[in-house]
Image: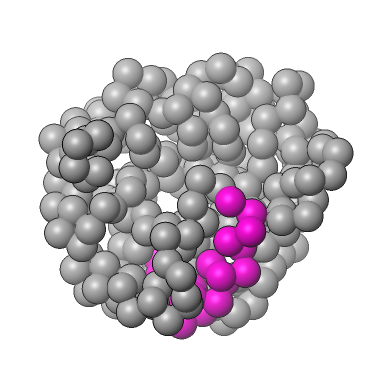
Amino acid sequence: MSLTPNYLNERICLNVLANSVENAKDCYEAAEGHVVLGVLSKKYATDEAAIEDMKQYQSATNNALSVGLGAGDPNQSQMVSRISAVLQPQHVNQVFTGVGTSRALLGQTDTVVNGLVSPTGKAGYVNIATGPLSSQAPAGIVPIETAIRLLQDMGGSSIKYFPMKGLAHREEYIAVAKACAEADFYLEPTGGIDLDNFEEIVQLAVDAGVKKIIPHVYSSIIDSTTGDTRVEDVQALLAIMKRIV
């Protein structure tokens, strides 16, 4: 079972939510394998329940599992680290302060572990106070270059830039993308990404020279009736990815 996401042309891998094992399998096929399927730890009462269920997602998608927090909930940080240590998924979502724990418990460097940072309103600076306690304190605003180096110190793979609010933070996002490219660090834009703005968001990262990009497209492509991620939308996103790279 591969521990590394399957990037399209070694550059882009989609991240979408899976509502069920069947939905995960359908989305995996629709993306021709260039996807990691998000399953949120928050919906499970215990580690054991999460591990047992997520193993089914792994076997249905060649381990294209992305262990999620649940709406970026910092209180899920420890649970994500514990269950990821057992599951060894391809992708782990973490708040900034949870990255070191996740990497240490994984015991390998192949799984992608992102670290959540937020926009500040000022290009070149991000808020790293995204942990369970730090998120309740005044913002921890640091240069994006420093945030990346801190994440690298902790064994992180990528910046999870949230909330993007689509392209509301366009200039800030470009600065983040450039810094990621210069530091040979991956980038994961997330929050408010849809079929309309997806291409520009990914293209900006490609143009900046980011080595690997994992855009998260969540609620905008979820069927409100079934809760499933729409397969046809995943196919549409793959077509856009192919156009870009």
* Magenta-span inclusion, residue 86: yes
Name above or below for residue 157 compared with residue 146. below
The stretch of residues the image draws in magenta is 73-91
Of 184 and 92, the residue lying toward us:
92
Q: In this view, does 241 lie to the left or right of 156?
A: left
Classified by dominant secondary structure, the portion drawn in magenta counts as helix
Q: Pinpoint residue 214: horizontal percent, then vertical percent.
A: 43, 45
Q: Pinpoint residue 176: horizontal percent, then vertical percent.
A: 64, 33
Of 171 and 140, the residue lying toward us:
140
The residue at 71%/54% (across/down) is 131
Q: Pinpoint residue 155: horizontal percent, then vertical percent.
A: 65, 65
Name above or below for residue 201 compared with residue 113. above
Judge whether residue 13 can be spotted in this image. Answer: no
Judge whether residue 30 can be spotted in this image. Answer: yes
Name above or below for residue 109 compared with residue 239. below
Q: Is residue 208 left or right of residue 87?
A: right
The residue at 31%/63% (across/down) is 64
Which quadrant of the view contains residue 100?
bottom right
The residue at 59%/79% (across/down) is 105
Of 156 and 18, the residue lying toward us:
18
Q: In which quarter of the image is the N terminus?
A: bottom left
Which quadrant of the view contains residue 122?
top right
The residue at 25%/34% (across/down) is 224
